[in-house]
Image (cartoon, rainbow, N blue to C red):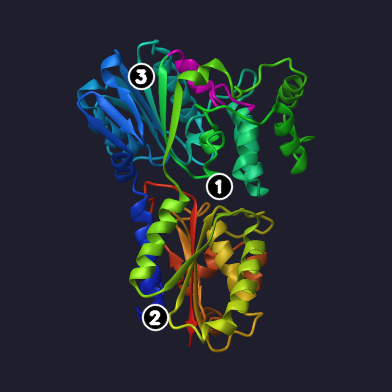
Amino acid sequence: MSENTQAEGGFLNDAEAIWRAAIAAVEPERLVRESVVREDNLVRIKGTTFDLAGFEKVFLVAFGKAAAAMAGALAAILGERLTSGLVVVPGPGVKTVPKLETIEASHPIPDARSVEAARRALEITGKAGEKDLVFVCISGGGSSLLTLPAEGITLEKKRRLTHDLLRAGATVDELNTVRKHLSAIKGGRLAKAAFPATVVTLVLSDVVGDDLGTIASGPTHWDVSTFADARGVLERYGFWDSAPALVRARLEEGSRGEIEETLKEGDPVFARAHAFVVGDNMTALRAAKHEADKRGFDTAFLSSSDTGEARKVAANYAAFLAEMACSAASLPRPLCLLAGGELTVTVKGRGRGGRNTEFVLASVVEMAKNNLEGLDWLILSLGTDGIDGPTDAAGAWADASTAGCARAMRLDPAAYLDDNDSYSFFKQTGYLIVTGPTGTNVMDLRVFLLRAA
């Protein structure tokens, strides 16, 4: 789980078993097999039935961190009825799927391969006719992996804006609002390319609330945001005046109605479009709760929709845990509190880290401000995709001994936090969680374990 050399046991073993159970529950192949059932020509997906006998050709386009696994499972179910398709993945080493072309693209910042992938996706779906069926598998990272800048907008301009918004702490919804209005494939435009074919989208959700218009920037779903909203995001983060002239011009023209908006609810394209969420953050949290219950914890959900600045959320949770300290001594069983969602980090320092390691480091700082004598605790936060910002860690953990370990090493947690250098802090103290890419993504998982010392 980590590089810490202290004896394994107690909360640490429990915490690892809990997060591993959560990630296993959102393994993409498993989720697709559980959600899609075929009997002869009938394919049932969460109560809706599609008769393959009524379609001439069946195409499959998958993109995102879970694309290969989702496509592989679905292709196996479709078997001989699958005509062809495309899988877009974030890196090498993935298993190819028979009948499907594979393209490796870039995440979280798109590259030329992302543009090639988007063009191929439009070509493939554009071949579909009224009597054809198009399956689309979407998972986290899809916005970057499938990128096609609108006319007049260069890839480099989109890359720069994406980079700046990420560092400024923009939410996924804000980031994708801008992406959709600078794109030729997002905001329902992939579904438009496939029309009048029937489109069935399977989604592994990586956004709060499972908003289908936000996940991967909604290529097969209608969009509620507007050009004016996209401009508002850039103004909010101070990037409007410095944005490229062609970007400003497009958003201004779109706001005046001179450029066609993203597709909206009620568009005829969506009369033949269906979407199903096969897994999300609550799927992982329920599995985590099941494992914690088995291990004798009194378990409760706090939230599956954490958003906001990581250090601010950490301060709120630390204050909550401090209040719980008084009652922990009287509880018959240790507590396990679970939360999920996706936080943000506004980068002002020169260090390395991600939203999860920053959250845990901020928790260490905040917990030290409270009198928690007599309370044994552990806090853990990790990305279910195994990737926390620009690092090789999934996240980190800390317990009541972390501050003392830091002092012994002459490390100041607050100074590392001020420099956004949470990765370096936990690398030195040995509290990193390193899993490697998990092949799935349902946002982040937070585990809080408490008991009387």
Query: How far apart are the alpha carbons under marks 1 and 3?
Result: 29 Å
Residue 286 spot, x, y in % from top left: 41, 57
Report which quarter residue 386 is drawn in: bottom left
Residue 100 spot, x, y in % from top left: 30, 26
Residue 208 numbered tag = 1
| Main SS, magenta residues | loop
Does the magenta run of residues contain 190?
yes
Residue 133 numbered tag = 3
Residue 13, placed above or below residue 72: below
Residue in view at x 80 percent, y 35 percent? 241
Residue 363 spot, x, y in % from top left: 59, 70
Q: Could you tell me the amino acid type at mark 3?
A: Leu
Residue 359 in the figure: left or right of residue 89: right
Q: Nearer the viewer, residue 287 or 445?
A: 287
Does the magenta run of residues contain 285?
no
Residue 6 numbered tag = 2
Residue in view at x 43 percent, y 64 percent? 433
Quarter of the image where the N terminus is located: bottom left
Residue 275 spot, x, y in % from top left: 45, 31
Residue 65, placed above or below residue 85: below
Q: Which residues are magenta?
A: 181-196
Kindly state the secondary structure of the residue where label 1 is placed. helix
Q: How many marks?
A: 3
Kindly state the secondary structure of the residue where label 3 is placed. strand
The mark lying in front, picked from 1 and 2, is 1
Query: Which circle's residue, 3 or 2, is located before the other in the chain?
Result: 2
Q: Is residue 353 visible?
A: no
Query: Which circle's residue, 1 or 2, is located before the other in the chain?
Result: 2
Q: Is residue 212 visible?
A: yes
